[in-house]
Amino acid sequence: MAEEKKRGYLDMELLRFTTAGSVDDGKSTLIGRLLYDSKAIFQDQLDAMEESSKRKGEEHINLALLTDGLRAEREQGITIDVAYRYFATPKRKFIIADTPGHVQYTRNMVTGASTANLAIILVDARHGVIEQTLRHSYISSLLQIPHIVVCINKMDLVEYNEEIYETIKQNFMDFAPKFDVQDIRFIPISALNGDNVVNRSKNMPWYDGATLMYTLENVYIGSDQNHFDPRFPVQYVIRPQSDEFHDYRGYAGKIEGGIFNVGDEVKILPKGLNTKIKSIDFYKESLRTAAKPQSVTITLENDIDISRGDMIVKANNVPLISQDIDMMICWFNEKPMQNNGKYGLKHTSRDIRCVIKEISYKVNVNTLERDYEDKNVQMNDIARISIKSTAPIFYDSYRKNRNTGSVILIDEGTNETVAAGMII
């Protein structure tokens, strides 16, 4: 019985979501309320939060303390770094990324949102749609997050006024055509009091939509993964060299797109040689089929020289192959980007080098306009650039596959990650 329960938990669907909004919009409080009302907080955590809230002379439990873990965050009452929290309901497992609201922490938001299925954009009902709202919505769109839930928070401070909610909703929708997102939803909430977070609000009878928790539990994410383009970057070659597996040669990695079956004809990149899949192994099991995002070991019918960084794809479905790449980047480093500068490039399991060929434009994320004049890319800037790599990479556009369409740039002198890139 316990084993069945454990397997049931492991097989539950996982939703990754991120929260974004301006400073003091209530992101950390909202997450605290979600966990508190869904009974996902341990008693010792609750006791520590109560004690800390009393010490500060606060009337209620400060739910934001649950995610603001750094001392500097607690002292200033803000979020500085990305905080991850895990919880589950009977329907789904969740990973939350609580990202900072300050402009200077845009890079942290990009990091936290890069793997999200859904973004919660918080708007303060008193202030409405502001520059940070547009900034975070644009970044969510740039990162191809399929679902956006706009939570209009602090409705208790505007007396739960329906007209204010409708005005903010309309103001946001005026900008929505500029965002590449198909699914945008709006929920009026009060994170402090719990209205429409987990439980339906009695203070807003005019709202007949779903609560935030119901939305998180039921939003359809099955089509978010790319199941059409099989991609298997090789991470490691397995040669046990034991008597039992004397001739075993397997290629281990994570499926980054599509479905692979035993017997499929596949092509090995960059060599371009064709062969067939002999077996798909998962620990002690042999599978007939495997799909994204499973981590498996594939063996092939022919002996081909394959190493880390190579990619196994279907013979009739090959990604783009090029050394000249156009991409959107978010710059992470305090040192500005060097035009014609040389950087390390990591793409799936492939490590090569590249040079910045051209900076096309920067994006003013407050007005969503392109700046073709200013080519000085500083920390937290978003820009379109062209690079040339020292060897071909095998990629899909980021819109098509977020895993094979993303790269990171690395400063080879310091080994710091200086940028995240989305291939166009």
Image (cartoon, grey):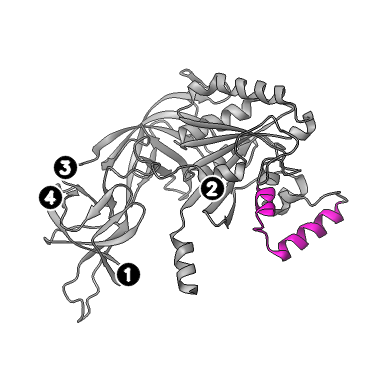
Residue in the image at 45% along x and 40% along y: 420
Q: Element under label 2?
A: helix
Residue 375 is situated, as x and y percent measured from the top left of the image, at: 47, 24
For label 1, the residue is 283
- Residue lying at the far bottom in this picture: please name it: 243
Q: Which mark is residue 217?
A: 2
Q: Horizontal and vertical percent for residue 116?
A: 49, 44
| Magenta span dominant secondary structure | helix
* Residue 243 appears in the figure: yes
**Number of the label disc, if any, that sits on residue 262:** none
What stretch of residues is rendered in magenta? 31-56
Disc 1 to disc 4, how far (Cα)? 27 Å
Whether residue 374 appears in this view of the structure is no
Q: CA distance from mark 1 to mark 2?
A: 31 Å
- Disc 4 is placed on an element classified as strand
User: What crowding class fits label 1: few (fewer than 14 Cα within 10 Å), some (14-19), or many (20 or more)?
Assistant: few
